[in-house]
Image (cartoon, helix red, strand yellow):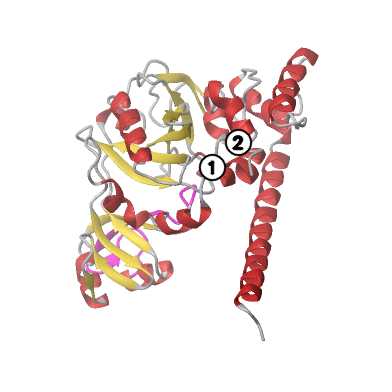
């Protein structure tokens, strides 16, 4: 007769297999990403002294040498050598999995829960929510269960609205802008029923944020997202270099992997001198508006950093979190979403020329060796 112990062993084996398959998928994706960018870094040379600096750092704290392809890739964008660059491959396959509890993460990563988690944080708001779908059940923005007919009535003449999946989404995947009038999306000509059916379930419908004047001056066609990565070292929350991503060519999606431009932002809110694309196009000004990046200042970045750190303290079991913010037309800080799995540390390093963990790189390397 099968015992509880046997069942637990089988379950553990299945989970290990699933996790192994997931890890293989991530590894394959990272190898593909670095392979398709080889033309960017193949001619980047690092000196013998620089190579020795990198390998000494990793051998002392990780116990082995590493490939410098990621160091050379980041350098190919920024022009800056930095021995503390953190390879994306090691972050996604090892460090993130060490820092964040996956079981808890699966429970809290639903993006429709953000308002419940962080509504008591001063100085930040969430986009107004018109409709939520969780596991096929419809809710109002204030979490009252409603019928499909009521859901349709809420949206049929809502006008502009953003729909995004609440689970397993990243890099702006499936986030889309609609304009509902008379039950028809004016942008695509599809009916409301067709649009909602395409998302199936687990999605949220929210207001379209109108960006602040300081962001619209750069590019008015997208929300323009500020990425703030916070991480925990011992008993204190720190933040990585901040980046701003903007759309271009009339595109409303600002993600760098979807054709956008990213630029470094100082802790004082001042933009760097160059905006970069995924494949290393360099822009001193936004190609659509002509606005120069160098010296352009954004308001409330100090408050943004404070808010991100306070929210991290309210998020248990997670030692690294990627927050996406924007500034609305009233210069209010708006939290768009957070990411605790499938985060990326390559583009803050690529854009800024700074190591994502800075002086804490050694602690993060050591963290990968802990059981």
Residue 224 location, quadrant: top left
Label 2 CA crowd tier, 10 Å (few <14, some 14–19, many 20+)? some
Q: Could you say whether the residue bearing mark 2 is in a helix, strand or loop?
A: helix
| Quadrant position of the C terminus in the picture | top right
**In this figure, which residue is indicated by the disc labeled 1?**
99
Q: Position of residue 112 (x, y in %)?
A: 33, 57
Closer to the camera, 302 or 97? 97
Q: Could you say whether the residue bearing mark 1 is in a helix, strand or loop?
A: helix
**Residue at figure coordinates x 58%, y 32% from the top left:** 364
Magenta span contains residue 311:
no
**Residue at figure coordinates x 61%, y 44% from the top left:** 92
64 with respect to 170 (left or right): right
Circle nearer the N terminus (1, 2): 1
Q: Position of residue 23 (x, y in %)?
A: 66, 53
- Please give the label number shown on residue 367: 2
Q: Is residue 250 visible?
A: yes
- Please give the label number shown on residue 113: none
Task: Work out which residue is located at the far bottom of the displayed protein and give it.
Answer: 1
Residue 210 to residue 217: above or below: below
Q: Position of residue 183 (x, y in %)?
A: 25, 69
Q: Mark 1 and 2 residues: CB-CB less than 8 Å, in contact?
A: yes
Label 1 CA crowd tier, 10 Å (few <14, some 14–19, many 20+)? some
Q: Position of residue 204 (x, y in %)?
A: 33, 59
Q: How many marks?
A: 2
Residue 325 location, quadrant: top left
Residue 139 location, quadrant: bottom left
Task: Work out which residue is located at the far top of the displayed protein and give it.
Answer: 49
Residue 65 to residue 198: above or below: above
The part of the chain drawn in magenta is: 170-191
């Amino acid at each position: 007769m099968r015992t509880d112990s046997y069942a637990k062993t089988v379950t553990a084996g299945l989970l290990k297999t699933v996790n192994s398959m997931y890890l293989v998928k991530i590894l394959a994706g990272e190898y593909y990403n670095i392979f398709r960018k080889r033309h960017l870094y193949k001619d980047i040379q690092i000196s013998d002294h620089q190579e020795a600096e990198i390998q000494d750092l990793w051998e002392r704290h990780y116990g082995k040498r590493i490939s410098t392809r990621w160091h050379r890739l980041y350098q190919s964008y920024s022009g800056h050598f930095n021995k503390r660059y953190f390879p994306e491959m090691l972050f996604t396959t090892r460090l993130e999995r060490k820092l964040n509890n996956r079981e808890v993460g699966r429970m809290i990563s639903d993006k429709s829960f953000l308002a419940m988690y962080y509504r008591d944080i001063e100085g930040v708001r969430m986009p107004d929510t018109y409709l939520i779908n969780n596991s096929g059940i419809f809710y109002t923005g204030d979490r009252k269960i409603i019928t499909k007919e009521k859901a349709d009535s809420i949206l049929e003449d809502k006008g502009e609205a953003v729909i995004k999946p609440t689970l397993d989404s990243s890099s702006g995947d499936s986030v889309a802008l609609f304009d509902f009038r008379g039950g028809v999306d004016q942008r695509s000509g599809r009916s409301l029923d067709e649009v909602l059916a395409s998302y199936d379930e687990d999605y949220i419908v929210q207001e379209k944020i109108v960006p602040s004047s300081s962001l619209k001056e750069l590019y008015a066609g997208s929300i323009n997202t500020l990425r703030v990565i916070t991480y925990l070292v011992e008993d204190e929350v720190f933040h990585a270099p901040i980046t701003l991503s903007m759309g271009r060519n009339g595109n409303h999606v600002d993600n760098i992997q979807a054709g956008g431009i990213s630029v470094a932002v100082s802790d004082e809110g001042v933009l760097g001198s160059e905006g970069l694309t995924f494949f290393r196009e360099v822009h001193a000004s936004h190609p659509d508006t002509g606005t120069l990046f160098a010296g352009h200042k954004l308001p409330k970045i100090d408050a943004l950093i404070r808010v991100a750190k306070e929210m991290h303290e309210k998020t248990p079991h997670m030692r690294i979190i990627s927050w996406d913010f924007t500034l609305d037309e009233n210069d209010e800080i708006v939290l768009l979403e957070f990411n605790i799995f499938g985060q990326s540390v390559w583009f803050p390093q690529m854009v800024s020329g700074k190591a994502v963990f800075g002086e804490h790189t050694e602690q993060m390397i050591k963290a990968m060796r802990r059981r």
